[in-house]
Image: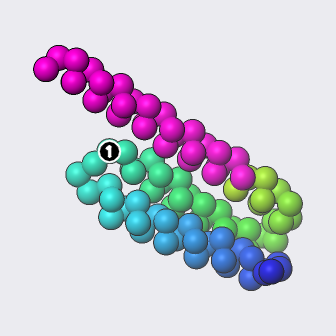
Amino acid sequence: MLDGDARTYGFMALDLVLAVAFFQLSRGHWFPVPLFFLNAVFVLYHLYSLVADVDLFWAQILLNRALEIELAYIVACSAYRIYCLRTYRSQI
């Protein structure tokens, strides 16, 4: 298990990979754009936490809430897509 700065570097690398992936997916589609911006902000937050020595407990709470927001966004977009597909099928 990683401790201290190594854990922060790991979180930062993961968020950077996710931000790049969502950036690639967002070309021509609106769904991944908020996920890209959220992960890009968290890369900056990880850099800030390395420089300012933010307590790891609060960083974990913030990241946990961000994950919950991302999941809620994905569920809401999925529900909207299902609604649109059902509406489209009922019109045929």
Quarter of the rendering occupied by the N terminus: bottom right
Q: In the displayed structure, would residue 87 be above or below residue 14?
A: above
Q: How is the image coloured?
A: rainbow
Looking at the image, which residue is at 45% across and 56% down?
36
**Image position, residue 42 (x, y; %):** 60, 60
**Circle count:** 1
Instruction: Tell me where residue 21 sits by quadrant.
Output: bottom left
Looking at the image, which residue is at 49% across and 72% down?
17
- Is residue 49 a member of the stretch shown in magenta? no
Residue at disc 1, secondary structure: loop
Quarter of the rendering occupied by the C terminus: top left
Q: Is residue 81 left or right of residue 60?
A: left
Q: Which residues are magenta?
A: 64-92
* Residue 47 seen by the camera: no
Looking at the image, which residue is at 66% across and 71% down?
11
Looking at the image, which residue is at 47% across and 52% down?
35
**Image position, residue 19 (x, y; %):** 47, 64
- Is residue 88 a member of the stretch shown in magenta? yes
Q: Is residue 29 left or right of residue 39?
A: left
Instruction: Tell me where residue 14 sits by quadrant.
Output: bottom right
Q: In the displayed structure, would residue 34 be above or below residue 19?
A: above
Label 1: how many Cα within 10 Å (few below 14, some 14–19, many 20+): few
Residue at which label 1 appears: 30
Q: In the displayed structure, would residue 92 be above or below residue 24?
A: above
Q: Is residue 16 left or right of residue 63?
A: left
Q: Residue furthest left?
A: 92
* Residue 14 seen by the camera: yes
Q: Main secondary structure of the magenta part?
A: helix
Q: In the displayed structure, would residue 90 be above or below residue 52?
A: above
**Image position, residue 54 (x, y; %):** 81, 65
> What amino acid is at disc 1?
Trp
